[in-house]
């Protein structure tokens, strides 16, 4: 019998146990009302013991689910096969990836520390830093920035369609930098922040190492998932700016290359075809248990790239669901010690 079938039986047994406990508790409550004081006291003690046992089990289960990593040695054959299926997508392909469960921090991937040119993915850490500065009162999102000739650039974005001298609120520049990957907006933003080194210093203060070759620099899947971890932590604060950032990431260009099914995805892509066909994406995937997924490649904006990115997302969602089903069974079994 496979591990999954055994664990499903365990899950069923756990629910049966809880049902029996509810019956016992109901009986105890009934008898305590219609019996003498001594019996009522004994029943009350029994009730307290049962309630304490249930509480301990529940706390152990919750702590296990939120804090522990399901070790690969405890994976079922099916879960291991799903992980290998994702890894096998990258055999003989000029691409790397990393999956990270954002609750337990379990990760796996291929070439997770290998760096490629980041392209526009680097706009994400700059925008997050700007929002943090605004939260601290160091930036005014209503401040007007002017599109100057020195910012003129082609490539992605919509500001290039406007006339030099046009003014934009900083909040609009941040939105355009994420939603449309606006190159002019990014240049305006870096000037407002005091240059790319200010962004670099901030992220290094969080424990990340960033290598800039220009204003865009390099990216590894590990660093990409680091960006997403910080976005997710920021999102969990419930701050308006954090919600705005994630909303814009959900509406960001090229979402169709990473969105699989109905799962909500907040992402930032980076493309630089002229320099060797770089195409990257970092994403926050809002499954029941959210995960980060970063993919870097030199495949360009090709059908092969699109198929690889979509298949990686689809299989990662399947893996994530299976991982938490097995982790839930594991944590139920651990809670049985009480």
Image (cartoon, rainbow, N blue to C red):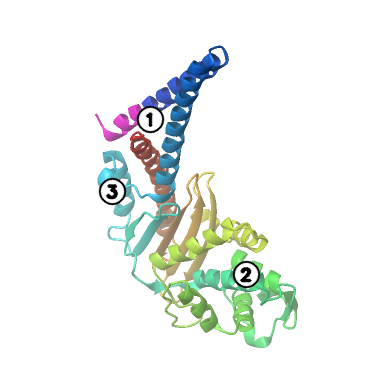
> Residue 321's x, y, as percent?
42, 42
The quadrant of the rendering that contains the N terminus is top left
Question: Circle 3 sits on which residue?
Answer: 72
Q: Secondary structure at mark 2?
A: helix
Looking at the image, can residue 7 be seen?
Answer: yes
Element under disc 3: helix
State the image coordinates of residue 287 (x, y, percent, origin top left): 50, 46
Is 83 a magenta residue? no
Q: Earlier in the sequence, mark 2 or mark 1?
A: 1
Of circles 2 and 1, the one toward us is 1
In the image, 266 versus 71, the foreground residue is: 71
Identify which residue is drawn at 45% across, 81% down. Answer: 212
In the image, the segment drawn in magenta is 1-10
Residue hosting label 1: 11
Mainly helix, strand or loop, the magenta region? helix
**Category of crowding for the residue at label 1, using alpha-carbon neighbours closer than 10 angstroms: few (below 14), some (14–19), many (at least 20):** some
Cα–Cα gap, marks 2 and 3: 38 Å
Instruction: Name the spot of residue 57 as percent of width and height, x first.
Output: 41, 36
Toward which corner of the image does residue 150 lie, by quadrant?
bottom right
Where is residue 124? Give x, y as percent: 54, 69
Left or right, 218 with reference to 132: left
């Amino acid at each position: 019998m496979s591990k999954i079938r055994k664990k499903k039986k365990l899950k069923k047994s756990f629910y049966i146990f809880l049902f029996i406990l509810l019956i016992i508790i109901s009986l105890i409550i009934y008898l305590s009302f219609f019996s003498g004081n001594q019996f009522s006291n004994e029943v009350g003690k029994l009730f307290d013991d049962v309630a304490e046992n249930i509480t301990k089990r529940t706390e152990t289960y919750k702590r296990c689910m939120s804090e522990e990593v399901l070790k690969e040695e405890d994976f079922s054959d099916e879960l291991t096969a799903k992980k290998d299926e994702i890894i096998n997508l990258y055999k003989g392909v000029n691409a790397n990836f990393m999956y990270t469960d954002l609750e337990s921090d379990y990760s796996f991937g291929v070439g997770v520390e290998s760096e490629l040119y980041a392209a526009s993915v680097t706009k994400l850490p700059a925008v997050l830093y700007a929002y943090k500065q605004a939260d601290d009162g160091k930036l005014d999102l209503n401040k007007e920035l002017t599109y100057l000739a020195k910012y003129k650039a082609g490539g992605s974005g919509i500001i290039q369609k406007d006339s030099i001298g046009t003014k934009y609120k900083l909040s609009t520049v941040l939105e355009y930098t994420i939603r449309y990957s606006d190159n002019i907006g990014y240049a305006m933003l870096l000037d407002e922040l005091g240059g790319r080194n200010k962004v670099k210093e901030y992220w290094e203060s969080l424990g990340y190492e960033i290598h800039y070759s220009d204003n865009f620099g390099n990216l590894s899947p590990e660093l990409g998932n680091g960006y997403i971890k910080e976005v997710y932590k920021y999102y969990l604060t419930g701050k308006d700016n954090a919600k705005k950032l994630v909303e814009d990431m959900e509406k960001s260009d090229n979402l169709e290359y990473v969105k699989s099914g109905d799962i909500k995805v907040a992402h930032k892509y980076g493309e630089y075809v002229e320099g060797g066909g770089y195409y990257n994406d970092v994403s926050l995937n809002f499954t029941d248990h959210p995960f980060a997924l970063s993919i870097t490649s030199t495949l360009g904006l090709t059908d092969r790239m699109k198929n690889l990115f979509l298949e990686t997302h689809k299989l990662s969602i399947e893996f994530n669901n299976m991982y938490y089903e097995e982790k839930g069974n594991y944590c139920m079994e651990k809670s049985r010690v009480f």
